[in-house]
Image (spheres, grey):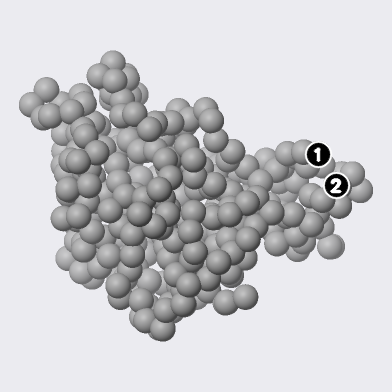
Amino acid sequence: MPDVEIGILGGSGLYSMEALRDIEEYAVSTPFGEPSDKYVIGTLHGRRVAFLPRHGKGHRYLPSELNFRANIYGFKSLGVNRILSASAVGSMKAELKPMDIVIPDQFIDRTYARKSTFFGNGLAAHVSFADPICRQLADIVQNGAEKVGQSITRGGTYICIEGPQFSTRAESLLYRSWGVDVIGMTNLQEAKLAREAEICYCTIALVTDYDCWHEEEEPVTAEMVIACLHKNAENAKRLVAAAVAEMPSDYTCGCHEALKFAVITDPAMISTESRTNLALILNKYLEK
């Protein structure tokens, strides 16, 4: 199995990382099924990274169809301990314009048809999720943005909706009344599962539109999203590359001990199947 440090998740419009060198594609099977595609493993600024197109090559999967568990578990099995997740979002505030980049630090969940935990089936665990984005990783992304002259907005709330339809006007106005900053369809489950897998996680939100609340702008369409992302893709790639170059080897966060006190189930009651499926995540605690 390759020994990879950093994972990169590419969303709509960001399907590849041309700056990667010494590339190989690696198929990963997980206890939770197949990831969205093969992982593209290569070297970026001297660091081993794995890139995964979130929706698969050719954008084949809807947000609700993504196997979030397999995607994150696959990164974990490759040795990844930090994930940068680039994702298209709509802006819920006038000051956040299309082509802007945001690092949100909070989420609201409006999904209902997704599996967003590795646990269950006789194994109960509850991780802390008060601060869903790794603060150290967010600092690294911000510093990388400064290095490449990319303006970036730090902080804000990302509301994750089920989709695949965009919001109604009533929903969009409701979310604005909640103080939401950006809206998307994918990142919350990734953040939850990364925390359970003890992987640092940071969203790089690429603003493409104003959803449908803005009276002076056209309601969002898929064509609008993709057109804006194609323009912004190069900025996103430069930012990701700069963040990788800035990545330290030490950790000042608690992400890598998220499960330390999270498992509630009596170890003697955990099934062999659960122990096998989650050995990659739990063994360092269960073997003590």
Q: Is residue 103 visible?
A: no
Q: Which residue extends farthest top? A: 170
Query: Looking at the rendering, in which quadrant would you find the N terminus?
Result: bottom right
Residue at image point 42% right, 40% down: 62
| Quadrant position of residue 146 | bottom left
Density class for disc 1 (Cα within 10 Å; few <14, some 14-19, many ≥20) is few
Density class for disc 2 (Cα within 10 Å; few <14, some 14-19, many ≥20) is some
Residue at mark 2 to residue at mark 1: CA–CA distance: 7 Å
Q: Which mark is residue 270?
A: 2
Query: Looking at the rendering, in which quadrant would you find the C terminus?
Result: bottom right
Q: Is residue 52 left or right of residue 143?
A: right
Instruction: Identify whether 179 is placed above or below 122.
Output: above
User: What residue would you read off at disc 1?
Assistant: 122
Instruction: Identify whether 127 is placed above or below 233.
Output: above
Q: Earlier in the sequence, mark 2 or mark 1?
A: 1
Q: Is residue 28 left or right of residue 259?
A: left
Count of marks, rendered view: 2
Check disc 2 and give the amino acid type.
Ile
Check disc 1 and give the amino acid type.
Gly
